Amino acid sequence: MSKLHRLLPALPIHWKLALWSSLLMCALFAGASAMQYVFVEKWMAGREEMAVRRDMRELLNELLAKEAAVEPSRFAQIRALLDKYNTRDGMVRLLDAGGEPVVAASDGLPSEVVYGRGPALPESAATKIAGGVLTISRPIQIFGFDGTVEIVRSLEPIERLMDAYSRIMLLCLAGALLLSVPGGRLLSRLLVRPLKTMNETMSKVKQNGLQERMPMDGANDEVAALKRMFNDMMDELQRSFEAQKQFVEDVSHELRTPVAVIEGHLALLQRWGKRDAEVLDDSLRISLEELGRLKGLVEELLALSRAERMELDETKSLVCAAPEQVLREIVDKAVRLRGNRDIRLAAEPLAGSMLRIGRAHLEQLLLIVLDNAVKYSEAGSRIEIKTAAEDGMAVISVRDYGIGIGAEDLPQVWNRFYRADKARGSAQSGYGLGLSIAKRLIRLYGGEIELRSAPGEGTEAIVRLRLAHE
């Protein structure tokens, strides 16, 4: 048994499926056959008992109808009547009150059984099955005679039939066992085939790349759903891989320029520029500017990385209790840094409200949106910030009247490092990470962000965040 216990886990899955499916089919067949055997046996015994009961009723009625006294002169007539209701390997007899046989009719039974003592006078009808024999007794009173009518039927024909039936079932079970092995093998192959196809596809993915997919056969079952899920997973993995590759390329491109500029000026200073005060000042200024640009890029990358690593559970307990105050602080900061914009704020609708977002994240989100509005609008132009509370959401709208975004660029501005340079001017500072960070933060808090824009008409950023209850 221990050897078998060690062997089973080592079998391939298709052999396990074949083995267990064969055993299951045999067990089901054996169980069904056993139930049929019991049912047929009880049904036939019941039918025989019903037939004996019917004969007993007819015999009693006929005995009572003839009004024949139970005396020796009538024994021949009574025996003839009993013979009428007797069968092969059966017996019908009349017993007195003490159980002694008075008249008997039998066919194929030993005399000691026929004339053996029977039960004493029963108070009511009795039925007994024992030793392959069915016995039914009924009391009778006729012309001062108190006795018992007893009918005995052998159940041997039923037993012979059931023996033959059991042999047939055993033969069928053996045939089912023989057929279940190839049937289980075929079933296991059908079940394992999708797994083999998936294994082959994975091997191809390892050899040829992420473009390999599971072939679809047009079915609409669980296996087809598994194939579709695998293909969808591979599509998502390929998109993520390509996005990561593009991200690395974009980061490398953004880092290459400031590093190359700083390297060039340091090489210039090392060769001869350090002896020229004007060249030294200019090189140091440019290097510090590029270093600041490099620092800003790294900070935005870190902010994006932190936003992408945050889980939903980390944000559930964060609430901003005074969003109108945060808005005023952000606007004051923007006015101090770039005082050449007419920024108009209407924060009163959010007074006394609480938002389901951390204060620091709300500040970061508003800075990103407002910085874009300032960056891509002309000096002296108007920027409108409106707020509202509707349907359990706080709505913050930031509208500028700048250069706007083209329809072909609008869906792409959420991608990392994307900048609509053709429409918005490549001279503008920035790395194309702000809106990616903003979208990630808003999704973490179950909010929404939307951009509406047209070239020459400006851009409106609409932020929707859930309101929090005390």
Image (cartoon, rainbow, N blue to C red):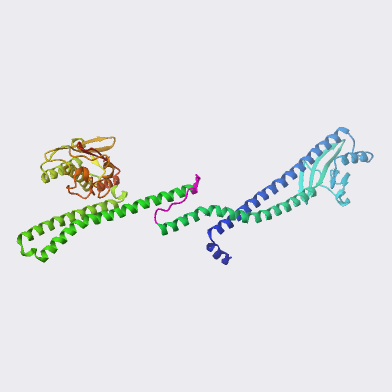
Image spot of residue 272 (x, y percent): 9, 65
Residue shown at the point (86%, 32%) measured from the top left: 65
* 215 to the left or right of 251: right
- Any part of residue 469 in sight: no
Could you tell me residue 239's position as x and y percent?
35, 51
Q: Start and end of the magenta stretch?
A: 209-223
Residue 268 versus residue 224: which sits nearer the camera? 268
Q: Residue furthest top?
A: 65
Nearer the observer, 181 or 394: 181
Estimate the x, y position of residue 207 in percent, counting from the top left.
42, 59
Q: How many marks overall?
A: 0
Q: Residue furthest left?
A: 277
Q: Is any part of residue 180 visible from this angle?
A: yes
Q: Main secondary structure of the magenta part?
A: loop
Q: Is residue 295 left or right of residue 444?
A: left
Q: Position of residue 51 (x, y in %)?
A: 78, 40
Q: Quadrant of the C terminus?
A: top left
x 23%, y 52%: residue: 303
The quarter holding residue 96 reads top right
- 460 part of magenta stretch: no
Residue located farthest toward the right when viewing the structure as drawn = 73
